[in-house]
Image: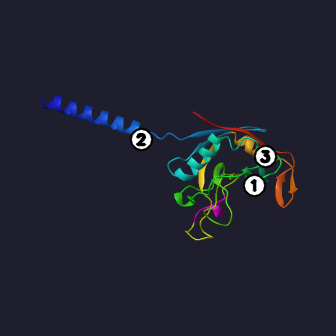
């Protein structure tokens, strides 16, 4: 009887443990950017950067990124996009979001972070992909100079496409520097499984 009770308890605990493990499985949203240079698949940090990830997903679902360009590409630093169309006209955006750079995520090679102005809480639709570990962009303090740039995702497929962006010739376009001379267009952005 005692042995049966022990087996029953072990079975119950292992079942509960398995059920808890399944509930806690982490499912991250994924977005595919179809660009003029190839496809890039991004996995979002829905849990650690919920505001930034939800913001990015909202723009994706609105079709906002279709026809935008990577307008600033600096080899060995980052590729920035999501704000200008092929006529180099800045698109209208939703309201700015809270800066989540204090979420513990670091600006490492292949991560996506929210682009912003000098105001730490001014990010809207623009984002950048880090070409290398850019620790100087990480959060250090809740001050104007220490806020950093909020990482909210990572390239999980197509980093070769992002690297190919850095090989494109760049120049000035109006007041903007480091603009690819041949447009690198986001043709489509979509949520995938």
Would you say residue 74 is visible in this rendering?
A: no
Q: In this view, does 182 lie above or below 19?
A: below
In which quadrant is the N terminus drawn? top left
Q: Earlier in the sequence, mark 2 or mark 3?
A: 2
**What residue is drawn where x is 81% and y is 51%?**
88
State the image coordinates of residue 11 (x, y, percent, origin top left).
Answer: 26, 31
Q: Nearer the viewer, residue 50 or 39?
A: 50
Please give the residue where the numbered disc 2 appears in the rendered image: 24
Instruction: Check if residue 89 falls in the magenta segment.
Output: no
Q: Which mark is residue 26?
A: none
Q: How far apart are marks 2 and 3 (CA)?
A: 37 Å
Pointer 1 local density, CA inside 10 Å: few below 14, some 14–19, many at least 20: some
Q: What is the secondary structure assignment of the residue under circle 2?
A: loop
Pointer 3 local density, CA inside 10 Å: few below 14, some 14–19, many at least 20: many
State the image coordinates of residue 183 (x, y, percent, origin top left).
Answer: 83, 45
Image: magenta residue range? 134-139
Query: Is residue 175 found left or right of 139 in the rendered image?
Result: right
The image quarter containing residue 173 is: bottom right
The image quarter containing residue 3 is: top left
Query: Is residue 17 found left or right of 120 in the rendered image?
Result: left
Q: What is the secondary structure assignment of the residue under circle 3?
A: helix
Please give the residue where the numbered disc 1 appears in the rendered image: 76
Q: Which of marks 1 and 2 is nearer the N terminus?
A: 2
Q: Which mark is residue 165?
A: 3
Q: Do the residues labelled 1 and 2 touch (CB within 8 Å)?
A: no
The nearer-to-camera label among 1 and 2 is 2
Q: Nearer the viewer, residue 37 or 98?
A: 98
**What residue is drawn where x is 22% and y is 34%?**
9
Q: Distance between the residues labelled 3 and 1?
A: 11 Å
State the image coordinates of residue 139 (x, y, percent, origin top left).
Answer: 58, 63
**What residue is drawn where x is 51% and y is 52%?**
48
Q: How far apart are marks 1 and 2 (CA)?
A: 37 Å
């Amino acid at each position: 009887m005692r042995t049966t009770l022990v087996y029953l308890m072990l079975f119950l605990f292992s079942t509960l443990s398995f059920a808890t493990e399944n509930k806690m499985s982490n499912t991250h949203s994924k977005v595919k950017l179809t660009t003029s240079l190839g496809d890039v698949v991004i996995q979002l940090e829905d849990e650690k950067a919920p505001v930034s990830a939800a913001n990015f997903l909202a723009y994706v679902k609105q079709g906002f990124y279709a026809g935008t360009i990577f307008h600033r590409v600096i080899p060995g630093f980052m590729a920035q996009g999501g704000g200008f169309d092929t006529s180099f006209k800045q698109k209208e955006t939703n309201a700015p979001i809270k800066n989540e750079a204090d979420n513990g995520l670091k600006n490492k090679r292949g991560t996506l972070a929210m682009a912003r102005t000098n105001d730490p809480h001014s990010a809207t639709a623009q984002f950048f992909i880090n070409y290398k570990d850019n620790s100087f962009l990480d959060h250090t303090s809740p001050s104007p100079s220490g806020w950093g740039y909020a990482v909210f995702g990572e390239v999980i497929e197509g980093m070769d496409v992002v690297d190919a962006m850095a090989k494109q010739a760049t120049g000035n376009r109006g007041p903007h520097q480091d603009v690819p001379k041949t447009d690198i267009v986001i043709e489509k952005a979509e949520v995938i499984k």
